[in-house]
């Protein structure tokens, strides 16, 4: 369903992911081992909340990047490069800078949640030349189970290579740009896949059988992650090759599962859902404070 030129399932999915992100940041004090991000932590911790946190982290932010890439591709056909960059600067960079100044002055938080907006603005700048090249020719790529597996494995190999230099949770900061090098490849590929999904109309063409296969593989990968809990709770395992491949496979299959399920079951709205969608961005910006 499209209302006022909006894809309702994307609005609802974004709001759902924001709720999960806020909830995850709220339970970080119960991680095991105790979180190095949250100053007040439960020294005993909770394996359940740790697994929930890690599993949610796998797909929530990547879904944000996918949706952003999807709509950026649509903007290219309606606006100039200058209009897009200026618009993204005011919508992404300015709120992020203001949020960081507030956090640094009053809360001494050096890794704000607005890192996503900073990285998204960077990705927008990187994607502009690619998107305008697409105007002169059509890049065809079908969504298949094999293609998704190959992309996930390719990203897993590249991510592992980055982890050899920058382990998981190692953050970099350049002026107002914060990011984790080990996550950047996964983030950018999901952003790029969003653009490809728009160009190739994946979400409309995908068959019910393929959607069921993707969701089924996503469930299996979550079960494997739960069984191999030592990969989840030991930072040494998180940087090994096996965990990195599993993490990337979960990212793409669980992420696409939520996107496809939202299209099928969340493509509607009402006053309550509309309220959640309208407030989601503001909640994301302010919840760190």
Image (tube, helix red, strand yellow):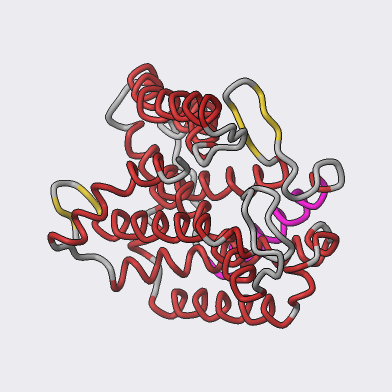
- Asked if residue 118 can be seen in this view, the reply is yes
Residue 142, horizontal then vertical, whole percent: 49, 59
Q: Which corner quadrant of the image does residue 145 belong to? A: bottom right
Q: Residue at 29% of width from left, 59% of height from top?
A: 12
Residue 69, horizontal then vertical, whole percent: 44, 43
Q: Which corner quadrant of the image does residue 238 belong to? A: bottom right
Please tell me which residue lies in front, 113 or 117: 113
Q: Residue at 65% of width from left, 65% of height from top?
A: 249
Q: Residue at 76% of width from left, 49% of height from top?
A: 158
Instruction: Answer above or below: position of 102 versus 233.
Output: above
- Quadrant where the image shows the C terminus: top left
Please tell me which residue lies in front, 4 or 168: 168
Is 170 positioned to the left or the right of 222 in the image?
right
Magenta stretch, main secondary structure, is helix
Please tell me which residue lies in front, 52 or 210: 52
Residue 254, horizontal then vertical, whole percent: 53, 68
- Does residue 159 show up magenta in the picture? yes
Instruction: Answer above or below: position of 104 versus 25.
Output: above
Residue 105, horizontal then vertical, whole percent: 52, 24
- Quadrant where the image shows the N terminus: bottom left
- Asked if residue 147 can be seen in this view, the reply is no
- Does residue 260 show up magenta in the picture? no
Is 171 positioned to the left or the right of 105 in the image?
right
Q: Residue at 66% of width from left, 47% of height from top?
A: 183
Is 34 positioned to the left or the right of 82 in the image?
right
Q: How many marks?
A: 0
Instruction: Answer above or below: position of 188 versus 247.
Output: above
Residue range highlighted in magenta: 144-161
């Amino acid at each position: 369903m499209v209302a006022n030129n909006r894809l309702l399932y994307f609005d609802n999915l974004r709001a759902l992911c924001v709720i999960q992100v806020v909830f995850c940041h709220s339970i970080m004090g119960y991680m095991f081992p105790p979180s190095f991000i949250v100053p007040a932590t439960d020294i005993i911790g909770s394996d359940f909340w740790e697994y929930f946190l890690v599993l949610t982290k796998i797909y929530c932010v990547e879904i944000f990047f996918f949706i952003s890439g999807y709509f950026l591709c649509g903007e290219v056909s309606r606006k100039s490069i200058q209009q897009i960059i200026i618009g993204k600067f005011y919508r992404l960079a300015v709120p992020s800078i203001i949020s960081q100044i507030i956090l640094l002055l009053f809360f001494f938080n050096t890794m704000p949640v607005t890192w996503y907006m900073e990285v998204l603005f960077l990705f927008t700048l990187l994607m502009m030349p690619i998107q305008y090249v697409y105007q002169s020719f059509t890049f065809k790529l079908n969504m298949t189970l094999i293609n998704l597996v190959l992309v996930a494995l390719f990203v897993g190999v590249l991510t592992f290579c980055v982890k050899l230099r920058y382990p998981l949770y190692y953050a970099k900061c350049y002026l107002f740009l914060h990011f984790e090098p080990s996550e950047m490849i996964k983030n950018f590929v999901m952003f790029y896949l969003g653009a490809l999904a728009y160009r190739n109309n994946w979400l409309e063409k995908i068959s019910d059988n393929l959607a069921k296969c993707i969701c089924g593989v996503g469930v299996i990968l979550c079960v494997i992650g739960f069984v191999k809990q030592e990969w989840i709770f030991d930072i040494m395992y998180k940087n090994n090759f096996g965990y990195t491949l599993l993490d990337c496979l979960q990212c793409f299959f669980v992420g696409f599962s939520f996107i496809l399920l939202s299209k099928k079951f969340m493509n509607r709205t009402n006053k309550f859902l509309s309220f959640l969608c309208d407030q989601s961005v503001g909640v994301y910006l302010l919840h760190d404070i």
